[in-house]
Image (spheres, grey):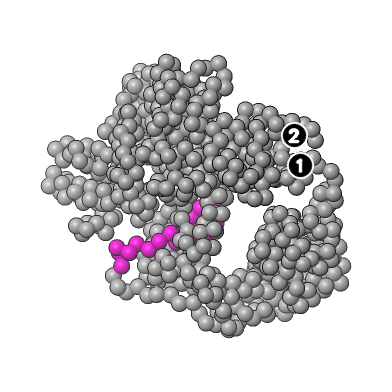
Amino acid sequence: MPKNGASSRPKIDLGSIDTESEAAEAVEELRRAIRYHNYRYYVLDDPVVSDAEYDRQLAQLQELEERFPSLQSPTSPTQQVGGPPREELGLVRHPSPMLSLKAVYTRQEVRDFAATCRRELGLQEVVFTAEPKYDGLAVELIYEEGRLTTASTRGDGTTGEDILANVKTMGEVPLELLQLGEEPVPSRLVVRGEIYMRKDEFNRLNEARLARGENPFANPRNAAAGSVRQLDPRVTAGRPLHIFFYEVADIQGRELRGQWEMLSLLPSWGLKVNSRLQRLCRDANEVLEFYDRLAEERDQLPFEIDGTVIKVNDRAAQRALGVRQRDPRWALAFKFPARQATTRITDIHVQVGRTGALTPVAKLEPVNIGGVEVQRASLHNLSQIEDKDVRIGDRVLVERAGDVIPQVVKPLLEERDGSERRFSMPQHCPVCGGPVITSQDKKQSICSNIDCPAQVRERIVHFASRRAMDIDGLAGRRTDQLMSSGLVKSIPDLFDLTKEELLSLEGYADKAAENLIREIESSKAQNLERFIYALGIPHVGEHLAGVLAASFKDLDALLQASEEELQAIREVGPEVAGSIRTFLGTPQNREVVEALRQKGLTLENPLYEERRQSKPLQGLTFVFTGSLQRWTRQEAGRLVESLGGRASGSVSSRTDYVVAGPGGGSKLEQARQKGVRVIDEQQFAELVSSG
């Protein structure tokens, strides 16, 4: 809570405010809360409210200042674009303000915006551009005579932090502009964009931090912002950062007529734009269609977005419409439903997974996040609970992303009243009562009873899942029914089920029983990689199951493989090799495998046969850095993999080639330090064609 005692979530009812004195009190309360949130978000990278809650407070303040002009103040947050910059990084004044965008949440507000633009411009039609609203860190780069001279964060919109040394470590940022087309490089270019981190890279970064005993980042935006604002550029160089450019604030020697022309022109100078996810729209209907498409694709995108940015395309029209005090009148951010919300933890219970791992789960007061009612959220392990100091009764910030179970980001410490209780991991399994063993670092708690019903149940559900043995009709409820009836006590029991036994159970008619028996029977003919995945070996997901199948001729070869043989596989490290060997070497697990064979299980292994076929890049690992002309880096990576090789995002001692285009950054230096061979794009093309 702000030090002066103001609430971080003031409850203001605009409809009840009639007098200037009432408005003055509400305005002051809102300003204190918003300044506090600006500090938490921009300075600490540690927000305590959702974006939607922040936007609501700011909208209320703007409305009150418009209704009561005498209450307007040059120091109000409505006059400010962001938070104060961190002086220890050095300060940079922007050539022109980096304005934020007005956020809206309804389709009608988008239609009203389009109508206002048409009316004020005196036009029957106005063309717009629609682009993703990236959830990263807004930055400004300045090129003088084609060379990168300045890089800064948004900061407060007028002055930002100097991040030039850090940005120079990013391979996607050209240190010198390229001339890839007929357009000459401008003598001066002020360009703005968003630095972001991909979801998969963010997850790997957090896994590595947890393995080192460090606290994970809350989300990709937080990770990207923290990575760029490091005092030591070497830390930034080790982080997987990317950028999309979306605005030219100033250009000399070239007139840009529209936003779409600008987006089309930037790649000719080596500046990356998201050409796949942008659209020129003739009216609000096309804008809304684009928004709907983005909303559908959102969870499948490799990066986080939180809405659609809508801009009047014509730059002369933009100038005619002008700007408000903190945002342009020619642009909007149409936000997706909130993915964060605040609620209270009413209890913490533990779930037992198929490997026996106990996972603490927070029971929440129901809260709507992104159109979904959320009543529980993962707390991962005892270590994270203690590191975050999460307690039963805490008010917490909860985040939901895609179909993943919501996560508790952090407790709101300023709202504690002393009634909160600490959580302790149970000493006995809540399912079977068996002893619980917790690791010394408190990151793992395991039920030591291998016959624990919770493990058996989850193993059966996983074994039958679509990506494993693909036995349709064995969802969790059906498995519970089979186990409670005593018909199934372990995985092999599935293959002994009869139609008559199923008909004795509630809910099974002739057709349902016949379908399940047919599904079970057809699953006996299976590919080896699906069976490996179905076994539920710790640390072995779908991808690694495929790697193992491609590396061993058959199941017997895998069962007999030593840890050394497993570690010889490029993607298998010591921890994974030990996990595989321990699992497959456990007598009870071997008994399950042999029992399945006796039930008639047959395993084909086409991956091994495919690997035996000659491929020119078989076993070679490539890393791409800088700007490529013939391919995008993603296309080049897919080409490598189609020829038997592997495309990696980081340089290691196992890397065979680093393919460097103009603007290659930290990866190029890492390759030289590790003695990895560096080739250019032409040499790579020759290597590919020679195969």
| Alpha carbons under labels 2 and 1: distance apart | 9 Å
Q: Secondary structure at mark 1?
A: loop
Which amino acid type corresponds to the residue marked 2 in the rendered image?
Answer: Leu
Report whether 31 appears left or right of 431. left
- Characterize the local packing of mark 1: few (<14), some (14-19) or many (20 or more) Cα atoms within 10 angstroms: some
* Residue 56 tag number: none
Going 51% across and 62% down the picture, which residue do you hit?
A: 212
Going 51% across and 72% down the picture, which residue do you hit?
A: 441
Report whether 118 appears left or right of 74. right
* Residue 617 tag number: 1
Contact, mark 2 vs mark 1 (Cβ under 8 Å): yes
Residue 420's x, y, as percent? Answer: 35, 73
Q: Tell me the magenta residue range.
A: 400-416
Q: Secondary structure at mark 2?
A: helix
Going 55% across and 71% down the picture, which residue do you hit?
A: 444
Residue 226's x, y, as percent? Answer: 42, 49
Residue 13 or 531: which is nearer the viewer? Answer: 531
Residue 559's x, y, as percent? Answer: 80, 67
Residue indicated by mark 2 = 687
